[in-house]
Image (cartoon, rainbow, N blue to C red):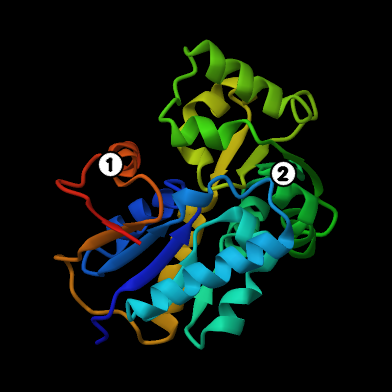
Amino acid sequence: MDYRAVGVFDSGVGGLSAVRVLRRILPGENIVYLADTANVPYGGRSVEELRRLAAASTRRLMAEGVKAILVACGTVSSNCLEVVGEVSALPYCGVVLPTARMAAETTKNGRVGVLSTEATARSGAFSRAISALAPGTAVLETGTGLLVPLAEAGRTDYSDAGVREAVRTSLSPLLGSGIDTLVLGCTHFPLLAGAIGEAAGPGVELVNSGAAGAMECTRLLEGGGLLCGRGSGGTLRCLVSGDEAKFARDAKLFLPDEAAIRVERA
């Protein structure tokens, strides 16, 4: 049994969509979550910048003595996931491959949309992964810089005119394309799942990259014999590079069942 914590990192609150699922399926595991809110959003950054930020987050989690790392960030996972392995010898996983696997299993008509950040869309990582898993699948990928700021601000309701406009604009390249499955390729986007689902319509199934990443992390821990074996009592610590008070408020949107969210300076 390994009682060390699981490390998870993202640019902001989005990766908590993965933490929420981890807390549900592995309630005994301790988790250290690193939110690089001082540098959010990552979506418009160059690959060189992303590599530097990913390396810094990995080293910070290593300093906490974690036993494995989940990169709960679609932008880092799609552009430079290998940096984690270059900096650390720890087992690690990202969100692209497990999400692609889930999308390939979900689609019935072979038409999948991917909504992600601009940097993720430029990488083409989701398209390549889905096509490799399900040859012949039509993958339509589009990137947006409009949604992460809304999620970070806690604005998620489709009745909000600004949210409605941003979601419709972001989805416009995909609407009417005949997709039956839509990948939420940024872990911030599950917070906007209600609004995105409204805009996409009832015939489109949403695939949550945060949940897919959490399940992949669980398989990683199980396969490596790294589970702590406890059925309850796991703790959650959040390390934040930016505004701690704002993060604590926003985190409750993702983790409404957490009695108290421990937030510290990264």
Q: Give the amino acid at mark 2.
A: Glu
Q: Which of the numbered marks, if any, corresponds to residue 245?
A: 1
Dot 1 and dot 2 residues touching (CB under 8 Å): no
Q: In which image quadrant can residue 253 be found?
A: top left
Q: Is residue 135 left or right of residue 78?
A: right
Q: Position of residue 108 (x, y in %)?
A: 69, 43
The residue lying at 65 percent from left, 39 percent from top is 182
The residue lying at 47 percent from left, 84 percent from top is 90
Helix, strand or loop for disc 2: helix
Q: Quadrant of the N terminus?
A: bottom left
Q: Is residue 209 above or below residue 57?
A: above
Q: Is residue 90 left or right of residue 186?
A: left
The foreground one among 241 and 218 is 241
Q: Give the amino acid at mark 1.
A: Ala
Quick one: label 1 or label 2, which is nearer the N terminus? 2
The residue lying at 37 percent from left, 81 percent from top is 67
Give the residue pinned by disc 2: 118
Helix, strand or loop for disc 1: helix
